[in-house]
Every structure is written in structure tokens, then in C-alpha cells.
Image (cartoon, rainbow, N blue to C red):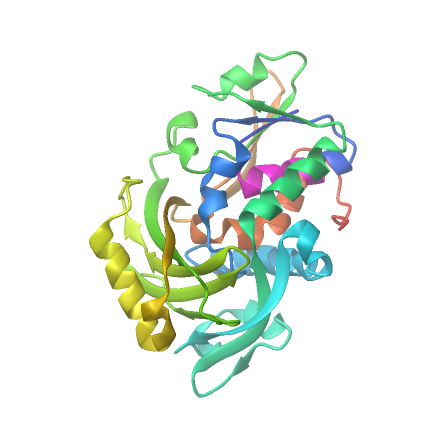
Amino acid sequence: MIVVGGGVVGLTTAVVLAERGRRVRVWTREPVERTTSAVAGALWWPYRIEPEAFAGEWALASLSVYEELAERPGKTGVRMVEGVHAGLRLDELGPWAARVPGLRETGEGLRALLPLIDMPVHLGWLRARFLATGGVVEERSVGDLAEAFESDAVDVVVNCAGLGARDLVPDPAVCPVRGQLVVVENPGIRTWFTSAGHADAETTYFFPQPGGLILGGTAEEDEWSLVPDPAVAEEIVRRCAQVRPEIAGARVIGHRVGLRPARDAVRLDRELLSDGRVLVHNYGHGGAGITVAWGCASEAARLAGGGEDQPRT
């Protein structure tokens, strides 16, 4: 079996499949540490993902896993951190929100203790966990999903190519939503903050990570540039400093740009090919790939014939 895509969705799917007894190879165009997932701010929250009903269930399944992984933060990169979604109310969200432990309304918005994930650490941990099963990660470009079926005795391919699915499927419904971030030295902030609508091109958030305070951001649809815009970076710092003034004087460590693989709805389905082989699609997670990774991985494994066991942590 081959999983195409080495971001958080692809690696998590590969782990679930391998731990259910399948022999799995991951094909990734970029090294794991250079995928879009690696630059994410990485707060658990169903952001820019549809359909909400399914996304909520996938997110809740993933939340249970992350809560357990947070017991080993140094190893897994997952921590439980307090914060607030400014301006949000419970009645603006789907039924899934009522099942998030401790999520409550305050004068500021919705406050909760949620998983915040240090992605470089987490991706490295996922890769090591996958390799420990006997899995293989191969860095290679793929021009067509048919290439994966041309490998020796491959009967199932799982497409977790993210934005790459636009060309590989091909699926023109997949488009980038550009996100720009600024990383600064943390002036002592220990809680996260977001103020972001699902349709807003400009967002305001900050996440305290071990390597610095991550400031955001943008959500620019159909923008492909990976080059940070200095003017946008200044505006991001300004907006965050309006919430926490001490951010204004923080030294800038670096800049990040990532392209969220957006789609009108996640594609998570099974395609039976004319020769009897199986192609499973698991892409189009927008800004919530990390949030739904384990839930979607379990469903993709079921579609691929990988059983229904719960993921172990």
C-alpha cells in the first residue's frame, strides 16, 4: 500500500494503516519538515473546513488522541494550552462544540484548554512512529496517481496529497488559501488567542510555541506566493500588539508562509478502479488538517480495508 503525501494527514494515515497490520510506504514530494504542515501555527480547531457535521466528528476523534499525546509533550509536541476565541459564541457553532470538554462562553468569547502542537516535533514523532512499524518514507515527485499502482504488488493507494491533489487527481476544486505568519521572541505570553472569521482574509492570532510566539495571519484565497510580504508582516505584528501590547517590542525571529489545501468540502471516499484495485482520497482539509488528522485517518483506513481499531497513543 502507498500513501501519497507526507504532511500531517498523510503521515497520520500511514501510522493508522501500518498499526492495523498493513505494509505501507509513504511517497512525499518534500521532506516531512518542509511540508505545509510544518509551518502551521497548529491549534486544534475546525477552521476553514467543510462539511461541518463530518468535520466536527473527525475533529472530536482527533481531540481524544491529542489529549493523550499531551501527556508526553516533549516527545509528541502536543501540549494542552488555555486560550480564547474572541467574539465567538457556542450557538454559532455546530453540535460538535457542545462535546469539547471545558469549552465555555465568557465576556471575551469562547475559552477552552485545547491542544497546541509544535509541528516540527510532532511531524518528527509521527515519522519515527511510522518507521517503527516497518514503514518506509520515500522522497519522490509524482506526476500521476497511476504511478503508485505501477509499483510492485500495490493494490491500494491512499491520496493524501493536499494541494497536490489539484494536479494529481486532477481536481480543480482544490485551491490554496495563503497563510503568512511572523515568529517573535515570546515576551512572556502563555495563552493563545484568535480572532478569525471563516471568510476573513485577515486574521489575528498568537500561539506560544517552544520556539517562539507565532503571530498571524492571513487567509488569502487563490494566492500561490510563498514569499513573505514585509508590509503584511508589519500589519500582523500591529494587530497582535493591539491585543497584547508587549508584542510590539518583541524581536522578530522569522517569517513563515504556507498554502492551506482548501476545497468546498473534504474529499474522503473510496474509488474502485476497473482492475479491482482501490484508490482512497483523503484531501481538501483547508486550515484544519491537523485538527481532523486522526479522525480522517481512521476513516481512510476503513475505506482502504484497514479495519476499525481505535488509534493507540
Image coordinates of residue 58 in percent, x first then y, are 59, 55
Residue in view at x 57 percent, y 12 percent: 150
Image coordinates of residue 156 in percent, x first then y, are 63, 25
Whether residue 303 is visible, yes or no, is no
Whether residue 30 is visible, yes or no, is yes
Residue in view at x 73 percent, y 59 percent: 68
Image coordinates of residue 100 in percent, x first then y, are 61, 71
Q: Which residues are magenta?
A: 6-16
The foreground one among 304 and 126 is 126
Residue in view at x 62 percent, y 71 percent: 99
Magenta stretch secondary structure, dominant: helix
Image quadrant where one finds the N terminus: top right
Residue 153 located left or right of residue 188? right
Q: Quadrant of residue 163?
A: top left
Inspect the magenta stretch and tell me whether residue 15 lies in it: yes
- Is 157 above or below relative to 281? above
- Is 44 above or below relative to 295? below
Residue in view at x 65 percent, y 20 percent: 155
